[in-house]
Amino acid sequence: MSRSYSNITATPENNLEVPVRPWVGSRSDLRERRLSTASQDSANDSTSHSIHVVKAFPSPPARKRATWTPHKWWLLFTNTLMFFYSMTMVVMSILTYMDLWYYSKVAIVSEVLILNLMLSAGCICLFTSLVGYTGIMLNNRAVLTIYNTLMWPCLAMIASIGYVAYRKALPSRPGVLYQRLSQAWHDFFSSTDRKVIQAYLHCCGLKTFTDMPEPSYKCFPRTLLPGCQHKFHDITAKGLQIVYAGAFSLIPVHLVALTSGLLCSNHIDRRFGKGLPPKMYRVENLGLVAGTPMGSSMNLANY
């Protein structure tokens, strides 16, 4: 008895897939199946890699801009003052030695000691100011200690310039300067020194043309040129007055710089002292116990 299957309707449930049987199909069918499987895997991989998970982190707090302390600004200001007046002393001494102003030769002949003191003081103060700049910019208190130590020789050199210039001028006793210049003319100046003074001051001899002159085409017997004593005295006295007034006026300024260095060197940054914790927060060595793989150091003391 035969059955008729004409009444069966094709539905999606009835359209079952053919089971995969690798041992039955041909090689071309196997290759197609492998290619389809590889394409599906690549599609899945591309989909998985296209999704990025980003974790939101809070933005770090903005760091405050580091600012200089008022003590550091004041220390920089006083050190700059010292740099300028030390540079002025060095430049004036070099200009005099290089004969770049009119009476420089006369100053070299008559007051070479003061010129040497000015050049030495200027060099020492200039070096000290550079050391101060190094300590200020690096916040190095050890360098600033050296800077404060070097300030004392600078003070001594500046004071010595004023003292020597004042002792040579003695404005309260003008006759002393006349006597000193007369003694230098007769006993200490060489013939070249006297020629230089006569050439720059347009004079002949000390008091008159007969008082130990140096012969030249302008200085000869019965010349009409006056003696060099008064001109030499006036120029020397004026130069000495400028020198000791400037040196004595620099002493208060240098004292302010020195005091500022002593008071402000430990406050160039906001660190207190040496940066150590207060004593109440320190850990004493007696309370420490060294740990070992087998126990503590207290156990080792028994062996």
Image (tube, grey):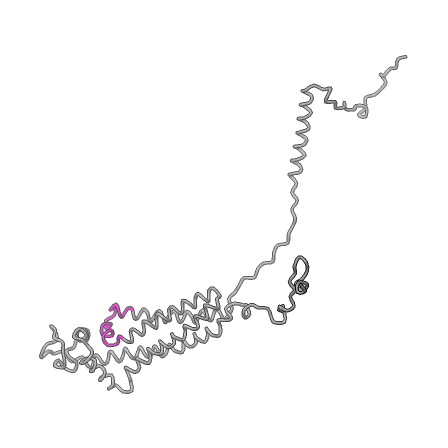
The x, y position of residue 4, in whole percent, is 87, 15
Left or right, 107 with respect to 298, comes to left
Q: 101 above or below 162?
A: above
Q: 215 above or below 34?
A: below
Residue under the point 65% across and 48% down: 55
The x, y position of residue 127, in whole percent, is 38, 68
The x, y position of residue 303, in whole percent, is 67, 63
Q: Residue furthest top?
A: 1
Residue under the point 38% across and 78% down: 251
Q: Check residue 109 for magenta coloring.
A: yes
Q: Main secondary structure of the magenta part?
A: helix
Q: Residue furthest left?
A: 222
Quadrant of image for the N terminus:
top right
Residue under the point 59% across and 68% down: 277
The magenta-colored residue range is 94-112
Among the 4 quarters of the image, the one containing residue 16:
top right
